Image (cartoon, rainbow, N blue to C red):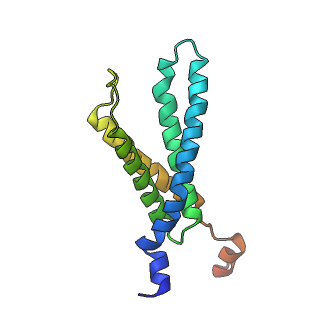
Amino acid sequence: MTKHSIKSGPAGALRPCALSLPISLAAAMILLLLSAAIAYAQPDPATLARPLSVVCLYLSALLCGILSAKRSDTPILSGVIGGGGMVLVLLLLSLLPYSASPSALSPLTAILMHVGVIAVSAGGAFIAMKKPKRHAMKRGIKRRKH
């Protein structure tokens, strides 16, 4: 196995994800603190708890995908792996004991939200992909003038 195949395969996508996952989780914590301050400034903070937490979740997943893609040779793969890492963290956090709230999500909604995290992280990786420069694209195809 050559060095290039390790860097561009799934093993090469793990390192950028391992570096970007803690950063995006820290950003999620900061976003959650800000959203808590916003919610508690309202007369009824409970109405904003779920929407703001979902926004924080998806913004941090987007950041994870962008950071993973910027550091990887396989950006989409690293974005998917980064989103999978975020889902793994969410699943581990769900094992912590807490008092059950009456507004818990249905299993189907929870599954769709977890799949959405992976999709948003891959979307962030797609956004961060290196785009070909315009002058390089012009060299490949010459247009005819009419």
Q: In this view, does 87 lie above or below 133?
A: above
Report the label total: 0
How far across and down, in percent of the image, does residue 77 sit? 44, 65
How far across and down, in percent of the image, does residue 86 sit? 43, 50
The residue positioned farthest toward the top in the image shown: 43
Query: In which quadrant of the rendered image does the C terminus lie?
Result: bottom right
The residue positioned farthest toward the left in the image shown: 107
Q: In this view, does 1 lie above or below 53?
A: below
Tell whether 116 sits left or right of 127. left
The front one of 56 and 133 is 56
- Identify the residue shown where x is 43% and y is 47%: 117
How far across and down, in percent of the image, does residue 132 sit? 64, 71
Query: In which quadrant of the rendered image does the N terminus lie?
Result: bottom left
Tell whether 40 sits left or right of 17. right
How far across and down, in percent of the image, does residue 104 sit? 33, 27
Tell whether 98 sits left or right of 76. left
Inspect this view and state whether residue 93 appears. yes
Inspect this view and state whether residue 144 appears. no
Where residue 9 sits, quadrant-wise, is: bottom left
- Identify the residue shown where x is 48% and y is 52%: 121
The front one of 53 and 29 is 29
Q: In this view, does 136 lie above or below 14?
A: below
Where residue 19 sits, quadrant-wise, is: bottom right
The residue positioned farthest toward the front in the image shown: 97
